[in-house]
Image: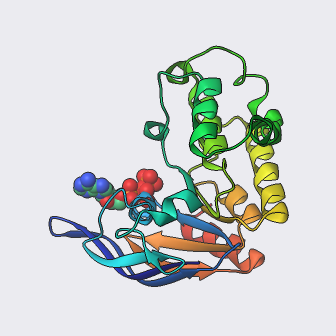
Amino acid sequence: MISVHNLKKQYKEVVVLDVPQLEIPRKECFGLVGNNGAGKTTLFRIMLDLVRATEGYVLLDGTDVAKSEDWKSRMGAFLDEHMLISYLTPDEYFETLRKIYVLSEEDLRLHLKKFEELFNGEIIGKKKYIRDLSKGNLKKVGIAAAMMGNPEVVMLDEPFENLDPSSQVRLKKLILEEKERSQVTFLISSHDLNHVTEICDRIILLEKGKIIRDLREKAEMVEELNAYFGT
Ligand SMILES: Nc1ncnc2c1ncn2[C@@H]1O[C@H](COP(=O)(O)OP(=O)(O)OP(=O)(O)O)[C@@H](O)[C@H]1O
């Protein structure tokens, strides 16, 4: 379980995140929405200890993520392309991760098989460097990497952005299947209200760093979010 306690992030005098309390139970598919600058990425970055909170802390199964490294093997994340190794091809990158996660070649083959439809013949065996991939294909590599090694938590920042419509549908299907098959907790930020309401069990709406809605019912999610965003 992930829990957030009195979390604040401030840049100079501006408070960009202010979350007194938040609990995300195991196996929840947790969606995070909000306008540009609402604080979604900041919350994710603090959860990954990429940015230090000004006040408060985040616990993953009771461990403070800013005070321990133990949680890192249990968390998979893709926030942006800086998390990839651009001078490798996707095959080389996945092989590097296979060794880090101590997976067998068969484990890797089975993992990548789940992404076959999403990759659409564009990623594996193409001998193209990650730096030369299109934005959508970069994202696909990052998502597949984040889900490697059976992490307990998978965090994806804007996973649908830059994906073509068929890839968006394939990704949605993949996440729903993974939710069904495993115990993984998904944390997904998105501007795409249709996709996020379809796959998430719960959606938090952030406004200027504060949680202003915590929605769990599908009908309520769609109605409240459409009203809020004027869509
Ligand atoms: N290093 C920084 N220095 C100053 N302000 C920052 C810094 N990083 C983030 N911010 C500010 O924090 C606020 C929240 O940004 P954040 O990237 O978390 O928003 P977001 O909800 O992910 O937005 P988007 O939907 O545009 O990706 C913004 O006002 C942003 O300008």
On the image, the x and y values in percent for residue 100 come to 56, 42
Residue 229 lies in quadrant: bottom right
Query: In the rendered view of the protein, which quadrant contains the C terminus?
Result: bottom right
Using the image, determine if residue 176 lies above or below residue 139: below
Q: In this view, does 148 lie to the left or right of 57?
A: right
Residue 152 is at least partly visible in this image = yes
On the image, the x and y values in percent for residue 196 come to 68, 60
User: Which residue is pictured at 75% across the width and 68% down the height?
Assistant: 183
Q: In this view, does 22 lie to the left or right of 180?
A: left
Depth check: give the residue in front, 169 or 63: 63
The quarter of the image that holds ligand 1 is bottom left
Residue occupying the far top of the picture: 127
Residue 222 lies in quadrant: bottom right
On the image, the x and y values in percent for residue 39 come to 40, 64
On the image, the x and y values in percent for residue 48 come to 44, 60
Q: How many marks?
A: 0
Query: In the rendered view of the protein, which quadrant contains the N terminus?
Result: bottom right
Residue 155 lies in quadrant: bottom right
User: Which residue is pictured at 58% across the width and 21% down the height?
Assistant: 89
User: Which residue is pictured at 84% across the width and 56% down the height?
Assistant: 177
